Image (cartoon, rainbow, N blue to C red):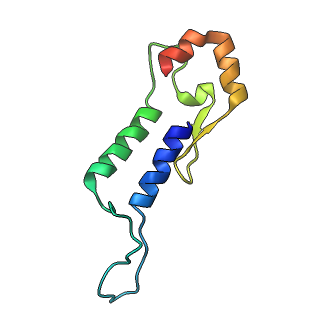
Amino acid sequence: VNAYNSLIDTFSSLTKYTAVDAGADSQSSSNGALLGDSTLRTIQTQLKSMLSNTVSSSSYKTLAQIGITTDPSDGKLELDADKLTAALKKDASGVGALI
């Protein structure tokens, strides 16, 4: 979770957009170096897709079922340690199959 959230922070800084006044000659120098980069967008889309896909070979189908959810405001993962612990106690192999 922490590694993923660190990656999201890096993506955010690399794709940061700072609005400029209409008619300005150039974009802001504080814009991220990879703003608008299609490869980075593809990676972001694929990661989000992987996190939201369901798994049919496990008793747990989604990360949310084991306590890992995505904050809709910033895209970072949040961990409910109690829910994860309960899932591991109930079916550790199912958690492993999901992950």
Residue 6: x %, y % from top left: 51, 46
Residue 62: x %, y % from top left: 52, 26
Relative to the observer, which residue lies in front, 5 or 50? 5
User: What's the residue at 49%, 40% (across, down)?
Assistant: 4
Asked if residue 94 shows in the view, the reply is yes
In the rendered view, does 72 fall on the left or right side of 16? right
User: What's the residue at 33%, 44% (across, down)?
Assistant: 43
User: What's the residue at 57%, 54% (across, down)?
Assistant: 73
Relative to the observer, which residue lies in front, 26 or 54? 26
| Above or below, comparing residue 23 to residue 61 in the picture | below
Relative to the observer, which residue lies in front, 46 or 15? 15
Relative to the observer, which residue lies in front, 31 or 58? 31
User: What's the residue at 54%, 53% (across, down)?
Assistant: 74
Residue 56: x %, y % from top left: 44, 16
In the rendered view, does 87 fall on the left or right side of 25? right
| Above or below, comparing residue 9 to residue 92 in the picture | below
In the rendered view, does 88 fall on the left or right side of 59? right
Image quadrant holding the N terminus, namely top right
